[in-house]
Image (cartoon, rainbow, N blue to C red):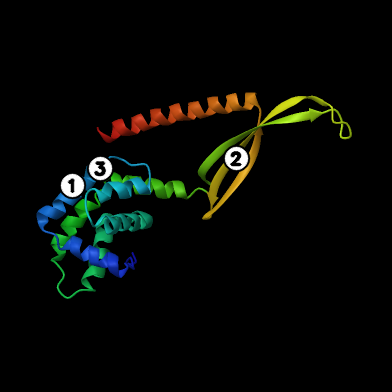
Amino acid sequence: MAKLTFDIPKEDFESLIELINLGDDDFKIISEKTLLLPRLKNYKEVESALKEITSHYKVVLNLFYTFCTFDLKEEQFVNDLYDYYSGKIENPINKEVFQVRFLSLFSNKSSVRFSIKSTLLEAEADHIYHDARILTDIRPVFSTKEELDILGKVTINQLKIIYRRKNKYENFFVNLDIEDLESLKVVIERAINKTKILEEIKLNQSHE
């Protein structure tokens, strides 16, 4: 299998060097705390959680992101990372020490690994939901085009969905009456309940 080519900016590489050169106990604390993080919903939550653990959170997050993007085995990723790192400095740490540390950090039991892979999987969809609004308006109903007698009124609800497609935000509108709104409410509540049930199953299985 081809070796992974890294392109780490200077500032992040300096942070990586500092991370690698931490004492065994300090690195172990970072690794263990990262391993104990709960499953998080998105990239931003993962970043915030790692920020509480280490000042080197950016490089740790980027390494996890690269690791999950290329979907490599832990051993290959760690070996490729070591080759990249050791080829750029004069006195690299022992390869065995490096492997033990980073294999522990990128363990398949890591919730960070799960969270980022989930984020990447969701991002593969063509349309990513961003936001929504319902615009409610009352329109008069006139007798004819020429006459201005108002026969009554009608309530118009426009559902505006904003979504991301290929890094560009787009939107569309759908007219809804009260029955449509009630029907949509039922559909959403069912989806919420089903999601909660599936999440409970996932969490129970992860603790077995």
| Residue 114 sits in quarter | top left
Element carrying mark 1:
helix
Q: What's under tag 2, amino acid-wise?
A: Lys
Mark earlier in primary sequence (1, 3) = 1
Give the labeled residue for mark 1.
32
Give the labeled residue for mark 2.
160
Query: Is residue 23 found left or right of 64 in the rendered image?
Result: left
Q: Quadrant of the C terminus?
A: top left
- Disc 3/disc 2 C-alpha distance (Å): 36 Å
For the image, the number of numbered tags is: 3
Q: Which numbered mark, 3 or 2, is in the foreground of this view?
A: 2
Query: Is residue 47 found left or right of 20 in the rendered image?
Result: right
Residue at 19%, 52% in the rendered image:
104
Residue 125 visible in the displayed image? yes
Whether residue 84 is situated above or below residue 51 in the rendered picture: below
Residue 113 visible in the displayed image? no
